[in-house]
Image (cartoon, grey):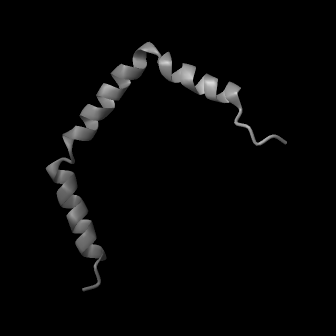
Amino acid sequence: MSSKPDLRKASRRASATEHKPVWAESLKRMYDSVVGEGVPDEIENLLKKLDQAGDPE
């Protein structure tokens, strides 16, 4: 077995990143906007209550 890298696989990976599907950039923008929204106050309060209920202090 050769220790040389498989150039065919590297070439396929490079070409896949060069030719992104049309929807890929739109999906990335949507994901970034959702991540940037943060956690709603109601969910954050619920998580705090759950954390406090789980603390054996």
Q: Residue furthest left?
A: 41
Q: Residue furthest bottom?
A: 57
Image x and y of residue 25, in percent: 36, 21
Q: Residue furthest top?
A: 22
Q: Measuring 69% from the left and 25% from the top, which residue is drawn there? A: 8
Q: Measuring 81% from the left and 40% from the top, which residue is drawn there? A: 2
Image x and y of residue 21, in percent: 47, 16
Side (left or right) of 7 relative to 18: right
The image quadrant of residue 50 is: bottom left
* Above or below 19: residue 44: below
Q: Measuring 20% from the left and 56% from the top, which residue is drawn there? A: 44
* Above or below 36: residue 15: above
Q: Measuring 34% from the left and 20% from the top, which residue is drawn there? A: 26
* Above or below 54: residue 36: above
Query: Where, quadrant-wise, is the C terminus in this rendering?
Result: bottom left
Q: Residue furthest right?
A: 1
Q: How many marks?
A: 0
Q: Nearer the viewer, residue 56 or 20?
A: 20
Side (left or right) of 6 relative to 44: right
Image x and y of residue 52, in percent: 23, 73
Query: Where, quadrant-wise, is the N terminus in this rendering?
Result: top right
Image x and y of residue 12, in percent: 62, 23
Side (left or right) of 9 relative to 17: right
